[in-house]
Structures are given as structure tokens and as C-alpha cells.
């Protein structure tokens, strides 16, 4: 059996060499980490759900002309992406106070912010991803002033789109983290959305109950992590409960089917 070349392994994903130059395969693992990997667990099926959710969101963003690294989903856990040079910044967009912002500024979790706020964190595990300003970013050459402008514009467009998308399925988008990459195309360089968008990197609260449907369930030991991710996938319509006839192509996993188990076609019967 041919062994694929592993390019990079992160906390929740692995990148393999792609089938063509300039492409990579992004593999979603079941690992969940928090507090700079001090807390770690395996949540069976999380990778499958994040692959689907991120595929859906990146496809939708592509449809509104947000450039992304996404090409296509390959299987349950993998997607084909364009190889980019990652800008070493975590770009956080916040609509509502939560998490580190609440702690830092003493804001009650859940209070609406006067406007959406963008923050930058330097991607450096050894330093616990410190928050940085545009001054640091340009002085140390992590991105140019033009790139920062473009990143901020894209981040706000992504936020506007996601707020509406989630609102439509009864979810409040509190905040999220995105990453961008430089795509080299002959003598052109363009910034594209990279990495993933999933409940691993968003705060998603149910509008009715306020229930957390994201990684805070893991960070804060609330239980029901997989169920929360499944609920997001179900509401987005990527976890179908509608049976498909045999032979109609790949069958999505029903919510009460073990998510990482063998994929069995649901045979015409509602389950
Ligand atoms: N986030 C992330 N990766 C990180 C840090 C934060 O995806 O390494 C996301 C997190 O899920 C939340 C948003 O960015 O949706 C803001 O996180 P915050 O700064 O409040 O940090 P936290 O409280 O999660 O440590």
C-alpha cells in the first residue's frame, strides 16, 4: 500500500500531500484539545462532523465570492485543498462578549458588543498564541498593512454571512476564529480563507435555550460535545435524516447512527 507523505500534523487535523502540485489533503481527526493542548480527548466522530460542516460553510462562502483554499470533499474525513502559505495569525471576530474577552475586560458573557470586533493573535504554541496589534504584525513582517486591511475586510464579510446563516437555524454566532493563507499563482499572490470553520473554532449558542453548541462544551466539561456538533450539522442540513435509496451514491450518516461506524445505507425506512 502506498504511504502518503504527511506534510504537517496539527492538534485536530493532518495535512497530506495532494494528488497534484499545489494541492493538499486536509484530514480531520477526532482529537479535541484545549488550553494549548494541556487538555486532550478523543471525541469519536468529531472529525467527520467538522469535515462536513466546514465543507458546507466554505462552499457557501465561495458562492458569495469569498476566496478559500477549499476544492472539494474527498471522503468522510478528508477534503482536497489548495496549498497556501499560512499567515501566522489567528483572526478572531467577536459579536458578543465571551471567553478571553470577558475575562480580560470584565464583560459579562453574553453581552452584545457595541460593534463587531476583530482581534489578532500570533500563532505560536510555545507562547500560548499571544494577542498582538497591527503594529506588531507589520513591524515583525507577519503581514503587510495591505494584507491586514484585506484580512479585516474578509473577516467582516465572513462574519456578516455567518451571523445570518446561523440566525436562520436558530443559532447565535458569538465569536469565531479564522486563518488566512497566501495562494501563489505564477506571479500573483492572493489571500484566501484557509484552515476550517466548525464548532471547534466558533462559539455557537442556541437562540432559544442559550445552550452552547461548540467546543466550550469540551473546554468547560459540559458533556454532550458530539451531540452539540451533530445538532449544528443537522440544522445546517449536512447530517441528513432523510433516507436515500440504495445505489444513489454516498449516504450521509443519520444522527442516531454511530457517526464513525460503517456507513450503512438507510434502506427506505425512516429511522
Ligand atoms: N479560538 C480558536 N482557537 C484558539 C483560540 C480561540 O478557535 O486557539 C476561537 C474560540 O473557539 C472562540 C474564539 O476563537 O470561538 C475566541 O476565543 P477566545 O479568545 O475567547 O479564547 P478562549 O476563551 O477560547 O480561550
Image (cartoon, rainbow, N blue to C red):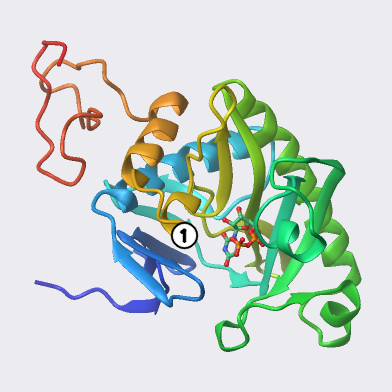
Name which residue lies at 68% across and 51% down. 98
Find residue 153 and report its horizontal and vertical position in percent.
Answer: 83, 50
* SS class, disc 1: helix
Residue 205 located left or right of residue 269: right
Q: Nearer the viewer, residue 123 or 222?
A: 222
Q: Position of residue 26 (x, y in %)?
A: 39, 61
**Beta carbon at label 1 within 8 Å of ligand 1:** yes
Q: Does residue 52 appear in the picture of this structure?
A: yes
Residue sitting at 54 percent across and 54 percent down?
A: 201
**Pick the front one: 17 or 94:** 94
Question: Relative to 127, does residue 193 appear above or below in the rendering?
Answer: above
Q: Name the quarter where the N terminus is drawn.
A: bottom left
Nearer to the camera, 97 or 116 = 97
Label 1 sits on residue: 219
Compared to 52, does 92 lie above or below?
below
Q: Quadrant of the image for the C terminus?
A: top left
Q: Is 199 situated above or below 184?
A: above
| Residue 189, image quadrant | bottom right
Ligand 1 visible in quadrant: bottom right
Determine if residue 16 is in view.
no
Amino acid at each position: 500500500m502506498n504511504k502518503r507523505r504527511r506534510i504537517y500534523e496539527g492538534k485536530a487535523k493532518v495535512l497530506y500531500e495532494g494528488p497534484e502540485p499545489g494541492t493538499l489533503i486536509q484530514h480531520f481527526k477526532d482529537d479535541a484539545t484545549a488550553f494549548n493542548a494541556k487538555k486532550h480527548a478523543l471525541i469519536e466522530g468529531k472529525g467527520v462532523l467538522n469535515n462536513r460542516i466546514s465543507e458546507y460553510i466554505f462552499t457557501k462562502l465561495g458562492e458569495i465570492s469569498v476566496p478559500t483554499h477549499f476544492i472539494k470533499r474527498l471522503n468522510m474525513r478528508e477534503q482536497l485543498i489548495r496549498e497556501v502559505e499560512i499567515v501566522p495569525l489567528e483572526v478572531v471576530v467577536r459579536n458578543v462578549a465571551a471567553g478571553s474577552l470577558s475575562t480580560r475586560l470584565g464583560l459579562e458573557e453574553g453581552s452584545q458588543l457595541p460593534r463587531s470586533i476583530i482581534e489578532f493573535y500570533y500563532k505560536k504554541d510555545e507562547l500560548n498564541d499571544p494577542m498582538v496589534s497591527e503594529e506588531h504584525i507589520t513591524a515583525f513582517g507577519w503581514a503587510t498593512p495591505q494584507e491586514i486591511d484585506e484580512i479585516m475586510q474578509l473577516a467582516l464579510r465572513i462574519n456578516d454571512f455567518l451571523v445570518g446563516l446561523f440566525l436562520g437555524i436558530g443559532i447565535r454566532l458569538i465569536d469565531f476564529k479564522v486563518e488566512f493563507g497566501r495562494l501563489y499563482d505564477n506571479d500573483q499572490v492572493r489571500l484566501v480563507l484557509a484552515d476550517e470553520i466548525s464548532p471547534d473554532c466558533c462559539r455557537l449558542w442556541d437562540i432559544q435555550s442559550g445552550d452552547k453548541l461548540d467546543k466550550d462544551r469540551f473546554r468547560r466539561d459540559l458533556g454532550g460535545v458530539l451531540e452539540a456538533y451533530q445538532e449544528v450539522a443537522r440544522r445546517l442540513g449536512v447530517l441528513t435524516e432523510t433516507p436515500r435509496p440504495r445505489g444513489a451514491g454516498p449516504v450521509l450518516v443519520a444522527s442516531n447512527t454511530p457517526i464513525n461506524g460503517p456507513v450503512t445505507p438507510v434502506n427506505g425506512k425512516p429511522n
